[in-house]
Amino acid sequence: MLTDTTARNAKSKEKSYKIADSGGLYLLVKPTGKYWRMDYRFAGKRKTLAIGVNTTVIPFIALLQPLVNFAANCECGNNKSCGVDIDANQNG
């Protein structure tokens, strides 16, 4: 699991890189800053949800955990409400 210390100590490099957490959640470290992203599947297609800029890590991860759990259940086919794309509001 991605820790507060790991996220805070991640340094920008010439090329972008990811530090993975669980359930598709990761911290994308670019030369311009740190960004939260989450990969998930909807209708058989891979999608990426842009969550935001890295700010206060621990409370932010705690808030995202239900979203990560929802996406994981959808991938496994365990959730009846998976007919809704979690990124639908941003795309349309």
Image (tube, grey):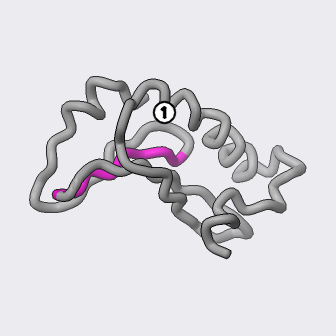
- Locate residue 10 relative to residue 23 in the image: left or right: left
Q: Mark 1 points at which residue?
A: 60
Q: Does the magenta stretch include residue 29?
A: yes
Q: Residue furthest right?
A: 80
Q: Is residue 80 magenta?
A: no
Q: 75 or 13: which is nearer to us?
A: 13
* Figure quadrant of the C terminus: bottom right
Residue 7 drawn at (x, y percent): 29, 34
Residue 82 drawn at (x, y percent): 81, 55
Name the residue located 15 percent from the left edge and 42 percent from the top edge: 11
Name the residue located 39 percent from the left edge and 31 percent from the top edge: 57
- Locate residue 73 relative to residue 53 in the image: left or right: right
Q: What's the amino acid at mark 1?
A: Phe
Q: Find residue 14 and report its image quarter.
A: bottom left
Please rate how many residues cluster around mark 1, counting C-alpha atoms within 10 Å: few if below 14, some from 14 to 19, many from 20: few
Residue 46 drawn at (x, y percent): 58, 66
Compared with 7, 33 (above or below) is below
Instruction: Classify mark 1: helix, strand or loop.
Output: helix
Name the residue located 33 percent from the left edge and 43 percent from the top edge: 19
Q: Give the range drawn in magenta.
A: 24-31
Q: Find residue 90 and report its image quarter.
A: bottom right
Residue 20 drawn at (x, y percent): 39, 42
Name the residue located 20 percent from the left edge and 58 percent from the top edge: 32
